[in-house]
C-alpha cells in the first residue's frame, strides 16, 4: 500500500471517530502535500482546523477545496460555518472595543437578521443606554410626552428589529408611524458594512403593527409636513449639513444614495410625489467601515454615541416641525 492510500484510510478513520485533533491535521496535511488536487483531504483539513479554532487557516483550506471542486457541498457548508464561528470569536483587540468592528458586521453578514439582533443584543443595548443618557434624547422624549406618548426613554431594550438579509435597525420607542429617530446597520448582501443615523419614514402598511391603514395615513401626513418644512426653511441648511457630515438619503430598498450630491438629495425629498409607493425614506449621516475615520468612530461606543447625539440634535428642529406642525 503506497503512502497516499495509507494516509487516506487513516484520515477517513480519524474523521469517523470524530478525531479532529493535531494528528488528524498532520495526516491530512501529509495527504495534500502528496496529492494537492485531493479536494476531500483539503475539506477534512479545513474541518480539523475549524475545530481547533484556527479559523483563518480553515478558511484557506476550504477555499482550496472549492477551487478544486466547486460542487463540494461539504466544503461549502463548512466554509459558511467557519465564517460564523470566526465572527462570533472576537480577537483580543476586538474584545477591547465597545462599539462595532468588522466582527460585529461579520455577525450581521453571516447570521439571519433576527439571530444577529440576538447575538449583538448586549452591544446594541449599551449603545441605546448611552444615547438615552444624552440631553437630546430627554428632549425628544419630553416632546413626545407632551403629545400624549407614554414612553420614558428614547430606545428600549427591544428596539432592535430584523430587516432583510444583512440589515438590522432600531427606531425610537413608539415611533413606528412617526418621523423616526432611526439607527440602522448593514452588511453584505444588503450593502457594504455601514451604519445610518438620522430620520426615517416607514410609509408602508406592511408588518404586524396595529392600525396599519390609519398608521400609514398618519406617517404619510408626517412626511408631507417634513417635505414642507424642508422646502420652506431647511433646503440649504440640510444640504450644507449633509455635505459636511457624510449625509445621504435612502429610499425604498436601495442602498444609501451616495451618487447624489447633497443638494440633489434634498431636492429629491422635496419633490417626492409618491412616498407610499417608495415605502421607506431616510435622511441622515452614514458611517462606512471602509473609511478609516468612520471605522474609528464605529468601534468606540462613546464616540459613536456622541455622533448619534450630534446628528439627532442637529435634525431635531426638522423632526419637531414634522411631528408637531398641524398646518
Image (tube, rainbow, N blue to C red):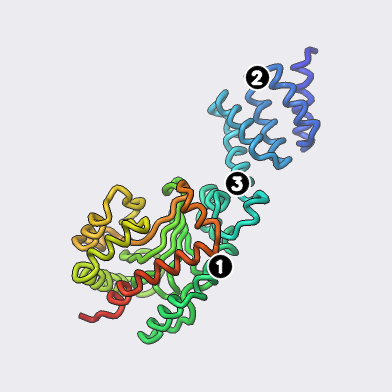
Tag 1, which secondary structure? Answer: helix
Residue 237, image x, y percentages: 26, 65
Q: Nearer the viewer, residue 38 or 73?
A: 38
| Image quadrant where one finds the N terminus | top right
Give left or right: position of 232 versus 291. Answer: left
Q: Is residue 187 visible from the viewing direction of this image?
A: no
| Residue 155 vertical position relative to residue 112 in the rendered view, above or below | below
Residue at the image point whose x is 77% and y is 26% from the top: 27
Specify the label residue 41 is tagged with: none
Q: Which residue is mark 2?
A: 36
Give left or right: position of 253 versus 85. Answer: left
Residue at the image point whose x is 43% and y is 55% from the top: 287
Q: Are marks 2 and 3 in contact (CB under 8 Å)?
A: no
Q: CA distance from mark 1 to mark 3?
A: 22 Å
Residue 269, image x, y percentages: 24, 61
Q: CA distance from mark 2 to mark 3?
A: 27 Å
Give left or right: position of 250 versus 62. Answer: left
Specify the label residue 84 is tagged with: 3
Figure label count: 3
- Mark 3 burial class by Cα count in 10 Å: few <14, some 14-19, many 20+: some
Which is more N-terminal, label 2 or label 1? 2
Residue 239, image x, y percentages: 27, 60
Q: Which residue is mark 1?
A: 125
Amino acid at each position: 500500500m503506497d503512502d497516499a492510500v495509507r494516509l487516506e484510510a487513516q484520515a477517513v478513520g480519524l474523521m469517523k471517530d470524530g478525531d479532529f485533533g493535531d494528528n488528524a491535521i498532520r495526516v491530512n496535511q501529509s495527504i495534500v502535500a502528496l496529492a494537492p488536487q485531493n479536494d476531500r483531504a483539503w475539506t477534512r483539513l479545513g474541518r480539523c482546523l475549524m475545530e481547533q479554532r484556527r479559523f483563518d487557516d480553515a478558511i484557506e483550506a476550504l477555499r482550496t477545496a472549492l477551487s478544486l471542486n466547486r460542487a463540494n457541498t461539504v466544503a461549502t457548508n463548512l466554509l459558511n460555518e467557519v465564517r460564523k464561528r470566526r465572527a462570533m470569536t472576537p480577537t483580543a483587540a476586538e474584545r477591547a472595543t465597545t462599539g462595532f468592528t468588522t466582527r460585529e458586521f461579520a455577525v450581521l453578514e453571516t447570521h439571519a437578521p433576527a439571530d444577529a439582533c440576538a447575538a449583538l443584543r448586549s452591544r446594541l443595548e449599551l449603545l441605546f443606554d448611552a444615547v438615552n443618557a444624552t440631553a437630546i434624547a430627554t428632549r425628544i422624549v419630553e416632546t413626545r410626552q407632551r403629545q400624549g406618548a407614554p414612553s420614558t426613554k428614547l430606545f428600549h431594550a427591544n428596539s432592535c428589529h430584523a430587516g432583510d438579509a444583512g440589515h438590522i435597525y432600531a427606531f425610537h420607542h413608539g415611533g413606528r408611524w412617526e418621523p423616526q429617530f432611526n439607527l440602522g446597520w448593514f452588511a453584505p448582501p444588503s450593502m457594504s458594512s455601514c451604519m445610518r443615523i438620522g430620520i426615517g419614514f416607514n410609509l408602508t402598511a406592511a408588518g404586524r403593527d396595529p392600525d396599519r391603514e390609519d398608521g400609514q395615513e398618519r406617517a404619510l401626513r408626517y412626511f408631507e409636513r417634513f417635505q414642507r418644512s424642508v422646502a420652506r426653511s431647511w433646503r440649504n441648511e440640510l444640504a450644507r449639513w449633509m455635505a459636511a457630515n457624510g449625509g445621504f438619503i435612502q429610499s425604498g430598498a436601495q442602498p444609501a444614495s451616495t451618487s447624489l450630491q447633497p443638494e440633489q438629495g434634498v431636492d429629491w425629498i422635496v419633490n417626492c410625489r409618491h412616498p407610499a409607493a417608495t415605502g421607506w425614506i431616510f435622511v441622515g449621516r452614514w458611517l462606512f467601515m471602509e473609511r478609516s475615520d468612520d471605522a474609528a468612530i464605529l468601534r468606540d461606543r462613546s464616540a459613536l454615541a456622541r455622533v448619534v447625539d450630534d446628528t439627532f440634535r442637529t435634525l431635531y428642529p426638522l423632526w419637531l416641525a414634522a411631528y408637531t406642525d398641524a398646518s
